[in-house]
Image (cartoon, grey):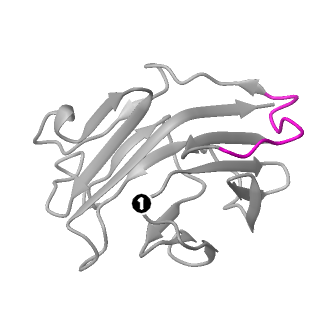
Amino acid sequence: VLVLALQIGLLNHLCSADPTDGFTNVPLTNANFELQKPYDIPLSERYSYGDGVHKLWVYANDKPHDPNSHTQPPRLAASHGATTIILRIYDGDMRFYSGDLVTTDFYDKWFWVNLIHDVDGGLLTIFIDGEQKFRHKDQGPGDLYFKCGVYAAPSNISYYMESRWRDIRIYRN
């Protein structure tokens, strides 16, 4: 079981029990944390860090992180490897990938995400601001890692996208 607790908002909710009891914190360090940016510009033009906040942004015409990549240009802060879930926010709606609705009214605000990935049970549970909002089967076994950031928007959505992250904590048992 992997528990991901990250705050991308102002946490005003207090829980009576600590959901990380029994888990070990996995600190993010230069050894397991990678930043990506367009291959043709310096990192400082798409990432900043100050007052405990990681800020990542992307423009629709940005190049990918590798000249041989055909993907939309991501800006990621990540531990190495694949992703097991993507939470996307467009027009204020948070979705699981681009499908199932997780929650609404999430534009231009801070919020707290807590993701529990029961690897053995194959289940993802998402809490937003301390309230369970979504459960879904995972994508099966594999080497899965935490990633956060912002990706280029689909056509005709937005020329500029940004995300800000703070208090990122990863736990495992």
- The quadrant holding residue 99 is bottom right
Left or right of 20: which side holds 103?
left
Q: Residue at x 34, y 29 (%)?
A: 49
The answer to if 35 sits in the magenta stretch is no
The answer to if 22 sits in the magenta stretch is yes
Question: Which image quarter is the C terminus in?
Answer: top right
* Residue 129 percent coordinates (x, y): 68, 53
* Residue 154 percent coordinates (x, y): 31, 74
Query: Which of the two residues, 82 or 29, is positioned nearer the viewer here?
Result: 29
* Residue 91 percent coordinates (x, y): 42, 76
Dominant secondary-structure state across the stretch colored magenta: loop
Residue 145 seen in render: no
Question: Which image quarter is the N terminus in?
Answer: top right
Q: Where 28 falls versus 133 (above or below)? A: above
Left or right of 154: which side holds 125?
right
- The quadrant holding residue 24 is top right
Q: Residue at x 80, y 33 (%)?
A: 20
Q: Where 25 falls versus 152 (above or below)? A: above
Pointer 1: residues within 10 angstroms few (<14), some, or many (20+)?
Answer: few
Mark count:
1
* Residue 120 percent coordinates (x, y): 84, 49
Q: Residue furthest left?
A: 40
Left or right of 94: which side holds 170?
right
Helix, strand or loop at label 1? It is loop
Residue 113 seen in render: yes
Q: Specify start and end residues of the magenta stretch as a single range.
A: 12-23
Q: Residue at x 32, y 53 (%)?
A: 162
Left or right of 12: which side holds 69?
left
Q: What residue is disc 1 on?
A: 108
Q: Residue at x 24, y 42 (%)?
A: 37
Q: Amino acid at mark 1?
A: Asp
Query: Which of the two residues, 110 or 62, is positioned nearer the viewer here?
Result: 110
